[in-house]
Amino acid sequence: MIYFLSDAHLGSRVIADPEGHVDRLSRLLRQMGTDATHIFLLGDIFDFWYEYLFEPHRWLHADGTWHMPRSKQLYLPLMQTLRTLTDGGVEVHFFIGNHDIWTFGDLARNTGIRVHRQPEAFTLDGKRIFMAHGDGIVPSDFMQRLPTELQVKIRRFMRLRAFFHHPVPQFLFRLLPPALGDAFGYEWARRSRLKEIRRPCPYKGEKNEELVQWAKEHPEYDYCVFGHRHIRLDLELGNNRRVLILGDFFQQFTYAVLHNGQLQICQHTL
């Protein structure tokens, strides 16, 4: 079995029970681990994640004990779960999202996961599958078809995205004390969550969803799987091709399963 999950936004300041949220995801991952060969985490697993220079970089010690940095103690159950999965032979792949870009080796080193900084395609169960978080993916002529106001917003987002991905500001932010950096990052993310709650962006229709249009432009893939949009979508594109947007794991608690070449979205229940 092969699993896909995105947009848990762990640690979000708008989640009433952050410890319970981490535990819920950890329990699901352990359950997946009973029959999984691969688990793909497609970004924004954390509402904010930064690995600072002046904090411990080795969390799992030779005697088997964990010593998490203060800024990441909330995530200890998840780290232990990921380490158990990878030690047990499950391939866990982590694609950075727009909220957890800033992993510089500590996450992979301590848990054994494989971090992907760019979209990638895999052949799994005989299917060619393209995977990405979804931010920054825009079809070729999409911008020209949008109203000017929306074009301005998208260009602003893309400039901000380029800034967040640039190595110079990344390095300078790493110099901050973790408490100060986290205060800024989690507050920024909190405002983003509140804005989404106040003004949700539901499914815009097949012709207006950029990820759907991008998938249509790439018939070389059987499945395109994305996160980012926080909508649950499984759309047939013709010729047995499909595009899936995974929903989220903080309100809808959805994920996808690939078994015998068939991909479907499921919902986790307590």
Image: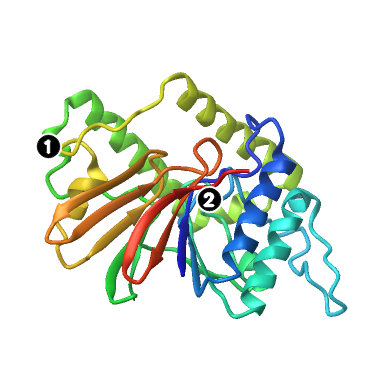
Q: Quadrant of residue 59?
A: bottom right
Which residue is nearer to you in this view: 85 or 47? 85
Apparent side of residue 182 relative to residue 249 in the rendered image (left or right): right
Tell me the distance, in whole angstroms, between the alpha carbons under discs 1 and 2.
31 Å
Three-letter residue code for mark 2: Pro
Please name which of the two marks, 1 or 2, marks the residue nearer to the observer: 1
Report the residue marked by disc 1: 144
Q: What x and y, as percent, mark residue 154?
A: 29, 35
**Displayed quadrant of residue 203:** top left
Q: Tell me the number on the disc at residue 169.
A: 2
The answer to whether residue 10 is above or below residue 243 is above
Secondary structure of the residue carrying numbered label 1: helix
What residue sits 60% from the left and 52% below the top? 172
> Label 1 neighbourhood size at 10 Å, few (<14), some (14-19), many (20+)?
few
Q: Identify whether 6 is placed above or below 93.
A: above
Q: Position of residue 160 (x, y in %)?
A: 41, 41
Q: Is residue 253 left or right of residue 122?
A: right
